[in-house]
Image (cartoon, coloured by chain):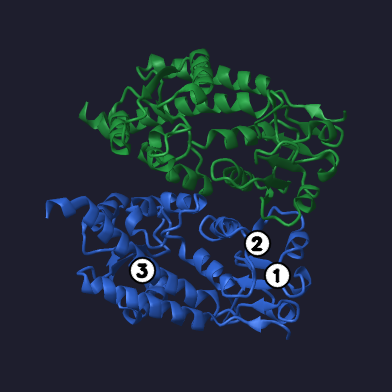
Chain colours: A blue, B green
Amino acid sequence: MTATLIDGKAIAARMRDETRAEAARLTALGWAPKLVSISVGDVAAAELYVRNQQKSAEAAGVGFEARNYPESISLEQLQGVLAGLNADPRVNGIIIQRPLPAHIPVKALQKAVHPMKDVEGMHPSSIGNIVYNDLTLGPCTAVAAVEILKTLPLKMEGLDVCVIGHSEIVGKPIAFLMMGLGATVTVCHHMTRQVAVHSRAADAVFVAVGKPGLVRGEMLKPGAALIDIGINRVDGKTVGDADFASCKDVAGWITPVPGGVGPVTVSILMKNAVLATAMQMDHYRSAFAAAV
Amino acid sequence: MTATLIDGKAIAARMRDETRAEAARLTALGWAPKLVSISVGDVAAAELYVRNQQKSAEAAGVGFEARNYPESISLEQLQGVLAGLNADPRVNGIIIQRPLPAHIPVKALQKAVHPMKDVEGMHPSSIGNIVYNDLTLGPCTAVAAVEILKTLPLKMEGLDVCVIGHSEIVGKPIAFLMMGLGATVTVCHHMTRQVAVHSRAADAVFVAVGKPGLVRGEMLKPGAALIDIGINRVDGKTVGDADFASCKDVAGWITPVPGGVGPVTVSILMKNAVLATAMQMDHYRSAFAAAV
């Protein structure tokens, strides 16, 4: 093994300490950050995520309320719930847990969350602000992957980066975040003729496809950084999209799965919660200060 | 010369005919499409653009009102003007002419245009919707460049594309529009180590930087499509970002400057005007139909 293993838990812990300090500052000002999690129907699939978020929120000093609505709720009723949460100054961030029942389109709910409370960074205008290099609340997984790369001793300007996977909430936002940092970015996906041609030329490879073993060592430039965002279950074990055994002998740095991008993603969610709270406080003060 | 010259004016004329038919249909339904152009202060710099847009609007059957506000107007006053236009059902699209005086930040105005009236496709949520592959109103120049490529006999899925220039309103939107079509996209810019490494591997090259002579024939793969979005004045002549003399002998297709992307961009603006009008009509009907 030549690759240095990237310790996602350590990065996440450092972020959480910063978030806790900021949460304490806001709480002292009367703006205790609070998240509301919305799940619909059978909670078993999302339960582990929600419990994990709840624990992280407690550790970061962020309030957390988990709400579960019955499977029979309509889209219009849920939009009404969100309108209420948008208007409630005691709620600073809204999380939409997936999966949702088939009659509730996830995008319709994401659009109904006020952009200032969009701690998951999923609203079209949150995504558009990344393109505009005006990052406030970014999609958590993409931001986490990029924050991990930034901990490495690599100069981002001019870095050749290959992103494998072009989903709206991971691959594309990573591409725009890296462009914003000055990297030269190529985005590959299932229609790309030869992924290896692009990945082998890259100083850093992000992979977020959901296919175990997709990236093998021979697809990497020796010494490259490999950020593995995949989460797959194989034979009862959690693995990423990289073939770890062959990649670790070629890469310069590699994230483990689990213990890489995952813990940092939850820390970014909490960081977004305090960012959102601070934005709302500033907005409230600029809108109403004159009247006080 | 081996390259086929792409006739932007002919493509623009075809689009204008489609737009005129749609404008006539909407007018017959009581929804005559109408644009309002906002310019501030000295109009000399924008005057040619505005006159050009006015002529195109007339040819497409779209109403056009050019408003000029004095240099002394404040940002807050302009935001008030936009709030009025947003609320006025007789106005279907708003164009913010640049340049603006230094005290008026262009992004603040773009954000103040209602996304349904954002015919320039500049609002963060318009940009975010492109990332989500949910294209309604896209940024005109980027959409024009991609529409031109789509007229060529090339299969977009798996096409290797190089975008040179990563501006928020041209380069980046072209990148995600092409990703949405299934292309493998690399975005290069001033921090890219060797642009030629990427451009020479590409089946199609878009260049939007604003540097005459930036792309030379030896930077292209023989037979590649070259879409030149640059507009530069050199010795009293308008030229693009490509060195036309050397590129025309290597490329398979090339857009002239002027007469390439420019005329198509104005046609896309008019197409957006009728799209916006149709969206507003549908929105109005779904919101108020029950009350009629």
Quadrant of residue B167 in the image?
top right
Query: Is label 1 in a helix, a strand or a loop?
Result: loop
- Badge 3 is on which residue? A42
Q: For this view, does A286 lie left or right of residue A204? A: left
B70, B247: nearer the viewer: B70
Residue B181 versus residue B89 in the image, above or below: below
State whether discs 1 and 2 lie on one chain. Answer: yes
- Badge 2 is on which residue? A164
Alpha carbon distance from label 1 to label 3:
34 Å
Task: State which tag comes first along the sequence, 1 or 3.
Answer: 3
- Please name the amino acid that badge 2 sits on: Ile
- Please name the amino acid that badge 1 sits on: Val
Give the residue displayed 24% in from the left and 73% down from the top.
A27
State whether discs 2 and 3 lie on one chain. Answer: yes
Viewport quadrant of the C terminus of chain A: bottom left
Task: State which tag comes first along the sequence, 2 or 3.
Answer: 3
Alpha carbon distance from label 2 to label 3:
32 Å
- Badge 1 is on which residue? A215
Q: For this view, does B3 lie left or right of residue A136? A: right
A127, B159: nearer the viewer: A127
Label 1 with label 2: CB-CB less than 8 Å: yes
Indicate the position of residue B110 as horizontal and vertical percent values: 41, 39
Q: For this view, does A174 lie left or right of residue B242? A: left
| Mark 1 chain | A
Inspect this view and state whether residue A231 appears.
Answer: no
